[in-house]
Amino acid sequence: MRWNNLTRPSEFVLMGLSSRPEDQMPLFALFLAIYMVILMGNLIIILVIYSDNRLQTPMYFFLSILSFVDICYTTVTIPKMLTNFLSEAKSILYTECLTQMYFFLSFGNVDSYLLGAMAIDRYVAICNPFHYVTKMSYKFCGILLVIAFIIPFLHSLLHVLLVNRLTFCASNIIRLFFCDVNPLLELSCSSTFVNEIVIKTEGLCVIMTPFTCIIISYLRIFITVLKIPSAAGKYKAFSTCGSHLTVVILFYGSASYVYFQPLSSYTVKDRVATLFYTILIPMLNPFIYSLRNKDMKRGLGKLLVKIKSQ
């Protein structure tokens, strides 16, 4: 390992999921298959939405963007992880590590903001159905989309710049399969006080904004649905939110479990939870949104017919 002026290493070592040589090829095959499923599943969602005129609505617009972001989100980490499975060094350059961390934080937070935008869409559709077209206009959806990208990318840039000012003069081994803020703070031999204060203030604000939108939207939805007299009407209203609510619970549940842990207590359970929100949820999203959605099933059927007829 080379060090630059004893302040930072030229590279980090990613421990990955297992250090046993006999595990590397099975893990490579498993995560290559998962990555292919993620790419194909989310690409199919995008193709289905843009090939069916009936799916040209705000909800499916945000879903198509979510699928695109999930592809980017997993592409930030999985290719490097696959490379390390086949390599003995398992190293990542310092600049590459910061770049990976920047895009990982960016796309991860874009995911949460898109889930917030989708919650707003469901709130308007259920609580104000007669004003849905005017409230969820192209202009408003565009504003939500711009916010969903600008805030996370600026937020991630701030944290990368703060990490870049730290010094690393001890270990360069990251106990994870990708570069993230907390593992790097744990390795730093300089004060991380500023980083931790920013995480607990600005970081918490950025993370809680879409989560608060989701909570408020679903509280209003729940109150509105309770006022519906018929059981069939209540079921129909809740069924339009089922897929979105499932993804929200899985994403925020697993991410919260990891990020609310102390820096020094990263265990095997945390590693599994990290895998869940970084890789497994993007893989499950296409199945959750397609298998539980009649419009998506119909759109997929039309797409298959078009492909067969060509």
Image (cartoon, rainbow, N blue to C red):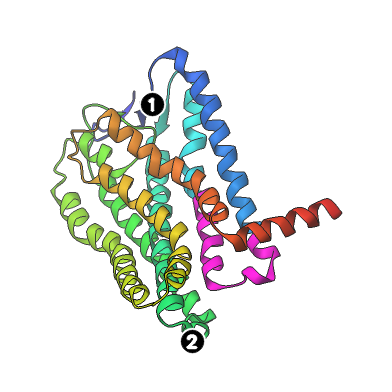
Task: Check if residue 36 falls in the magenta segment.
Answer: no
Question: Residue at 50% across / 58% down in the picture?
Answer: 66
Front-most of residues 4 and 43: 43
Question: Residue at 42% across / 83% down in the picture?
Answer: 128
Label 2 Cα neighbours within 10 Å, binned few <14 / some 14-19 / many ≥20: few
Q: Earlier in the sequence, mark 1 or mark 2?
A: 1
Q: Quadrant of residue 181?
A: top left
Q: Quadrant of residue 115?
A: bottom left
Would you place residue 244 above or below residue 180 in this image?
Answer: below
Magenta span: 48-71
Would you place residue 132 above or below residue 2 in this image?
Answer: below
Q: x%, y% of residue 227?
A: 34, 78
* Quadrant showing the C terminus: bottom right
Q: Quadrant of residue 281?
A: top left
The majority secondary structure of the magenta stretch comes to helix
Q: Which mark is residue 17?
A: 1
Would you place residue 218 above or below residue 293 in this image?
Answer: below
Task: Mark 1 vs mark 2: give the one in front.
Answer: 2
Can I make out residue 118 in this image? yes
Query: Mark 2 sits on what residue?
Result: 130
Under tag 1, what secondary structure? Answer: loop
Q: x%, y% of residue 40?
A: 62, 45
In the rendered image, the residue lying farthest to the top is 22
In the rendered image, the residue lying farthest to the front is 230
Would you place residue 60 above or below residue 230 in this image?
Answer: above
Question: Residue at 60% across / 38% down in the picture?
Answer: 36
Whole-number angstrom distance, CA of label 1 to CA of label 2: 51 Å
Given the image, on which type of amino acid does mark 2 rest? Phe
Given the image, on which type of amino acid does mark 1 rest? Leu
